Image: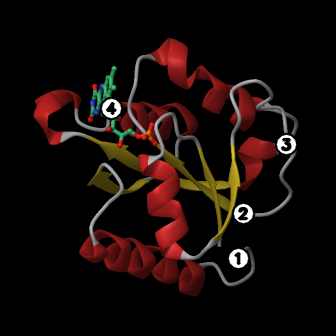
């Protein structure tokens, strides 16, 4: 499974690298890249003006068609606002919020996330 991620301060990037999945980073200066295989978005939580590049990526060409689900990085100190970016994107694009974690995730988070992804692969062998 391919992970497409956005990261401002490196926490999400570190999480993605720990999973060892193939990945692509959304870069704020040019988010307009076409993807032609199923992917999971992994996003940190910030104001919309910071994360709108993620929407730009998903909305580009046919990219949305390949979006399977979202994972979110956040900080539990934000209480009800924990991982709201990932939650909003899941709602907007009609895909599940697959996993949420704090900062770059623990070893346990990486394990659990990989299990969730492997279950998708089993359910959708034609697409993954
Ligand atoms: C200005 C700012 C606002 C943030 N707002 C939220 C928030 O509303 N909810 C949340 O869960 N985390 C929030 N966070 C935490 C980040 O999303 C979290 O640290 C994440 O791991 C950062 O990922 P990155 O290093 O890949 O950018 C905020 C962090 C900063 C610096």
Which residue is rendered at x = 87% and y = 45% of the image?
A: 34
- Determine whether label 2 and label 1 are within 8 Å by CB: yes
Q: Which mark is residue 38?
A: 2
The residue mark sitting in front, 4 or 3, is 4
Give the alpha-carbon distance from disc 4 to disc 3, as whole Å: 25 Å
Which residue is rendered at x = 76% and y = 24% of the image?
A: 29
Question: Reading the chain from its start, which is encountered first: label 2 or label 3?
Answer: 2
Pointer 4: what residue? 84
Give the alpha-carbon distance from disc 2 to disc 1, as whole Å: 6 Å
Pointer 1: what residue? 128
Whole-percent x and y of residue 56?
71, 26
**Quadrant of the rendering where the N terminus is positioned:** bottom right
Q: Quadrant of residue 126?
A: bottom right
Pointer 3: what residue? 62
Which residue is rendered at x = 80% and y = 28% of the image?
A: 30
Q: Is residue 123 above or below residue 56?
A: below
Q: Is residue 70 visible?
A: no
Residue count near mark 1 (Cα–Cα under 10 Å), binned few <14, some 14–19, many ≥20: some
Residue nearest the observer in this picture, 45 or 67: 45
Please, what secondary structure does the residue beneath circle 2 have?
Answer: loop
Question: Reading the chain from its start, which is encountered first: label 4 or label 2?
Answer: 2
Q: Is residue 125 above or below residue 46?
A: below
Whether label 4 lies within 8 Å of ligand 1 gets the answer: yes
Give the alpha-carbon distance from disc 1 to disc 3, as whole Å: 17 Å
- Determine whether label 1 and label 3 are within 8 Å by CB: no
Please, what secondary structure does the residue beneath circle 3 have?
Answer: loop
Residue nearest the observer in this picture, 60 or 24: 24
């Amino acid at each position: 499974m391919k992970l497409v991620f956005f990261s401002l301060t490196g926490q999400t990037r570190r999480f993605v690298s720990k999973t060892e999945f193939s990945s692509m980073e959304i870069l704020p200066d040019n988010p307009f890249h076409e993807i032609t295989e199923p992917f999971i978005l992994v996003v940190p939580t910030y104001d919309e003006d910071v994360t709108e590049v993620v929407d730009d990526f998903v909305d580009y060409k046919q990219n949305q068609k390949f979006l399977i689900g979202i994972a979110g990085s956040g900080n539990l100190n934000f209480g009800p606002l924990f991982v709201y970016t990932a939650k909003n994107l899941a709602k907007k694009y009609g895909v599940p919020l697959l996993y949420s974690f704090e900062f770059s995730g623990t070893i346990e988070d990486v394990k659990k996330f990989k299990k969730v992804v492997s279950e998708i692969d089993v359910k959708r062998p034609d697409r993954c």
